[in-house]
Structures are given as structure tokens and as C-alpha cells.
Amino acid sequence: MANSTSGDSVTDRLVRVLETFTPTRTVQTTAEIGRRAGLPSSSAHRIVGELVEAGLLERDEDRRVRIGMRLWELATRSSRALRLRQAALPFMERVQSRVREHTQLAILEQDEALFLERLSSPASGSNVTRIAGRLPLHASSSGLVLLAFGDRELQERVLAAPLHPLTAATLTDPAAVRRKLAEIRTLGHAVAPGFIEEVATGIAVPIRDETGRVIAALSVVLPRDAQPEFAIVELHRAARDIERSLGYRH
Ligand code: PHB
């Protein structure tokens, strides 16, 4: 359904508008949205106006635009994410209260780790993870778990692309990542010391469905120098309980 001189469809344009919002860019002017979506000003004003009308976007008193509650409501009904998140929450709370550091739930989405939930307490240390935010597969503990237990094509695709460093400790050599993935499969968990940020160590374990396929990763973010053993035990226990609560038996 092409509707413009450039030949892109209404849906393309809507998606481009919505994708200008990121975990750190949640409020924008219509002009900024238009520029970032590559749309002429008149189209940007029309599309944003229609989306505001439908409740999918909202305007504040300064006419700046953010994602609307109606869009949150529809998106949160995503059955896959909702079911997993609801099953995981009680056990994430147990991990969080016993380990007393950030606890996250992530799934694989478009070759990245997408975070469905994060629990923290005021005393928890540094953590860049955001709910509905993403981290690269090769750099985060959750991403490494999803990659290690993911299919062959995913691994080859990710390892063939540039592996960007986030710190001096991030693994950027495909051979080193392959060794790390083999280690994760052997140990059953991932430890990523300083890969995402110098001051933190990510630790993650897989959550499996009844066929044994890994459907998610459960992780904690500890201060870099913390001992990981207790967190690893708690994460494994929580992963088993989440699998059981989803009705999966191994
Ligand atoms: C990780 O999962 O490896 C991770 C995530 C967020 C951080 C640090 C580490 O801030």
C-alpha cells in the first residue's frame, strides 16, 4: 500500500515514527520525530496527530510527544512476554531479596537481548539494563546465554557481524566468543566480568521450555569484584522454579 512519492507504505511510516522512541529518548517534538523518521514535516505532523488521536502517542503541556498508555496497554498483552514475566516475577523477587542486586529477565529478539523485567533496590550497584531496552548478545551475560544455547544460524550470523566493544573486557574476537559460548554450555551459566561496564559483572542462566529449548535468560548484575557463586545457585534455583510454574517438567 504505497501512499507517498517515495513509495513507502503507511505501515512503514508508522513504524518509523514509533521506532524513533528508544529507552533513553522517550519524549520528542514532532519536528524531531519527523527528522529521525526521515519524513517531511507535513507528513510527520499528520501521522503524529493521527496517532495522538488514537491514543497510541500522547502530548504533554509543551506539545512534546511520548508513547501513549493505549500503546503500552496493547503491547503489554503480548502473550509470550506476559506469561513468561508473570511466571518469573515471584522467583525474580526471591533472587533479588537474597542476592540483593539487580535481577533481570531477557528474551532473544532480532539478534539482541530484550529485557522484559528488571528488579532493583536502592542499594544495588550500577546497571545499564532498562525494561524494554536491549543489550548486544556477545557482550551481556543474558545475551551470551541466549547465544550459547541458540541455534547455529544465529551464532554464525552474530559472529560474522562486527562485535563492538563496550569496554576493554568485551570479547570482540569471534574465536574468543566461540570459546566463551562453549564454556557457558559446559557450565550451564554465563559470567561476564566487565563486558558491559567496567564496574559490573553480569551472571545469567537459561530458562528452558519442556523440549529443552532455551526461551529466556535470568540474570543478576553484581559489583565487579563480588563473588558469583551464591548468585549462580540462586539463579539456577529460580530458573527451575520458573520452568515448573510455566508447566514445564524435565
Ligand atoms: C550483563 O548482563 O552482563 C550486564 C548487564 C548490565 C550491566 C552490566 C552487566 O550494567
Image: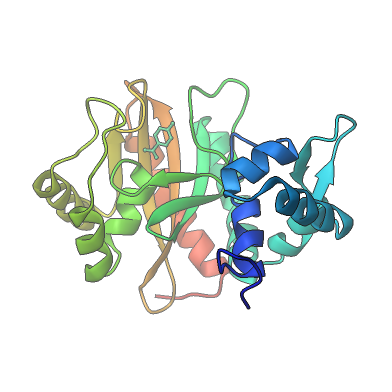
Q: On the picture, is 210 further left or further right than 89?
A: left
Residue appearing at x 88%, y 56% in the figure: 53
Identify the image quadrant of residue 160: bottom left
In the picture, which quadrant includes the C terminus? bottom left
Q: How many marks?
A: 0
Quadrant for ligand 1 reads: top left
- Which percent across, then down, holds residue 119? 60, 39
Residue furthest to the left: 175
Residue appearing at x 61%, y 70% in the figure: 9
- Which percent across, then down, holds residue 71? 76, 57
Residue appearing at x 59%, y 51% in the figure: 19
- Which percent across, then down, holds residue 40? 66, 49
Residue furthest to the front: 5
Residue appearing at x 83%, y 52% in the figure: 49
Q: On the picture, is 60 further left or further right than 202?
A: right
In this rendering, the answer to whether 229 lies above or below 238 is above
Colouring scheme, one of rainbow, by chain, secondary structure, one colour: rainbow
In this rendering, the answer to whether 113 lies above or below 86 is above
- Which percent across, then down, holds residue 115? 52, 49
Front position in the image: 39 or 143: 39
In the picture, which quadrant includes the N terminus? bottom right
